[in-house]
Image (cartoon, coloured by chain):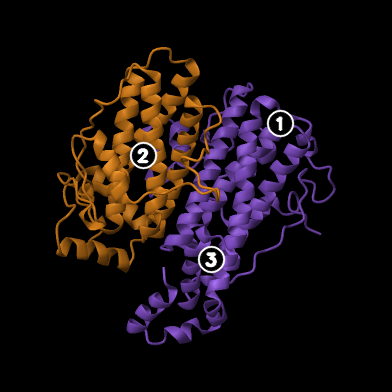
Amino acid sequence: MKTELNKTTGGANMVRRSFLRYAGTGAAAVAILGAASCKKDYSKGSSSNDIGIGDMGVLNFAYALEQLEAAFYLQVVATPYSGITTTETAYLTDIKDHEVLHRDFFKTVLGTSAIQTLTPDFSKINFSDRASVLGAAKLFEDTGVRAYDGAGYLIENVDYLAIAGKIVSVEARHAALISNLLTPGSFVASDQVDTNGLNYTNTIAEVLAAANGFLKTKVTASNFNYYA
Amino acid sequence: MNLFEIIDEIEKVDPEIHERLNPRRDAIKNITSFGSKVAVAAMPFALGALFKKAYGQTTTSVFDVLNFALTLEYLESEFYNVGTAKGVVPAANSAYIANITRDEANHVTFLKNVIISSGGMPVSKPEIDLSGGNGSGTGPFASAFTDYNLFLTVAQAFEDTGVRAYKGQAGYLKGNKTILTAALSIHAVEARHAAAIRQLRHDRGATATMPWIVSTASLGNDTTVAAVNANYAGEENTVQGGVDLKALGSIGAVTAAFDEPLTKEQVLALLSGSFLVKR
């Protein structure tokens, strides 16, 4: 593999290179990427809506969810619901900032392996209504936690696993807060936490089926048994 | 689920499966009684660990991780049990704290069951000094059970540190569908607790406290309690996967958007000789 920088590819690619180098892309990960590109070209280029295969597939899965969350909170902050409090504005603005960072982080590190920019469909959400907005926020956050926790075991590169771990606990913090804003004390209610004290998890297929209900651009995961 | 069919299937591709499983043969023969003693929900976890052991990969690490987690859960559970018993929690917050108390007790039970059913030996409950005084009972947090604000401060540090501790162990469980998924699921619940405790503190007047950890460029700790600086050391990190995110947002947002791990050694250094009594 060439490691010298190609001046014509721009900064994003350089950053991605440094990420992959940092992540200790060993022979195994390279082999997976190589195998993916030798077989079917599932995720090459930024025009695909299929998350792809292997670790890049899991990262694209996360990128899809973060795109959806970021778009949602950008709208929430741009058009606050009636009766929003100062504290709620502060909370939701922070969450918006976090989700935008997550989205931009994945876009940067995925580089040319990234799926396309997704167009959301928020027609089911009434952004002027507190219950509608917070209900959707709870769904997105709870789904995000279940998604990261459910896909963690699929990640082969320990550095990517670490990144997923760093993000999922922040999503869980969001989820707990949003849940409490809707119903005080519901942050570990039985809809999300089982009798062993474990957060429920979902598969990639389950999560994308739910997420696609809020996306005009449907995301597929042909290597993870999900077709939109 | 029929374990014997699974083993037979493996035998087709790995004729030495029975040799590999030999040290665990008793456990396999006694699978029925083993199953009846362990909560059914824990069975897949048990089998996951069993096969890890058979293939000799990271068995020691898996049990190390589970026992480390169990030690932390003993401590957290004790803290909330004592707090509840001593009546430090005001009625308005009792539902919140009761939920957390329940979850921590469930984590202790769950981890013990998983370790036992996987053929391991759970560590026993350590000697705990909730004042942080290494057995003296007069440590810096001795008044946590009469001063609710201090109780919440200690709770926040425990929860945030617990999140960091689980996060630091994930790599040792890489690819282990049952155990890693369980650990990540507890990790998420600890993060839910941390957010809720922080929200309670916010509502009681600590208005700079957010449900997430908002660090400055030079200080990870956002609690304003210097005694727990080390619990938050490293949370000020802005570089993720080799990418410095400082250019993409404010320092507060960049640090809050990613929680940072602690190693087992870092966590034990924080607790041993204070909350975990060292003679």
- Between disc 1 and disc 2, the foreground one is 1
| B243, above or below B114, in the image | above
Closer to the camera in the image, A145 or B164: A145
Judging depth in this view, the residue of A175 and A90 nearest the camera is A175
Q: CA distance from mark 3 to mark 1?
A: 36 Å
Label 2: how many residues lie within 10 Å, few (<14), some (14-19) or many (20+)?
many
Cα distance in 3D space between marks 1 and 2? 36 Å
Q: Disc 1 on helix, strand or loop? A: loop
- Residue type for callout 3: Val
Nearer-N-terminus badge (3/1)? 3
Q: Amino acid at mark 2?
A: His
Callout in the foreground (3, 2): 3
Q: Position of residue B197 (x, y in %)?
A: 60, 33
Q: For mark 3, name the chain.
A: B
Query: Circle 2 is placed at which residue position?
Result: A102
Q: Callout 1: residue from which chain?
A: B
* Residue under the point 50% across and 27% down: A183
The picture quadrant where one finds residue A141 is top left
Instruction: Name the quadrant of the N terminus of chain B.
Output: bottom left
Image position, residue B157 (x, y; %): 63, 40
Q: Nearer the viewer, residue A10 or A46?
A: A46
| Image colour assigned to chain B | purple
Q: CA distance from mark 3 to mark 2?
A: 30 Å
Say if residue A170 shows up in the picture: yes
* Residue type beneath disc 1: Val
Q: Position of residue A37 (x, y in %)?
A: 17, 61
Check disc 1: other Cα within 10 Å, few if <14, some if 14-19, many if 20+: many
Q: Chain of mark 2?
A: A
Q: Any mark on residue B89, and which?
A: 1
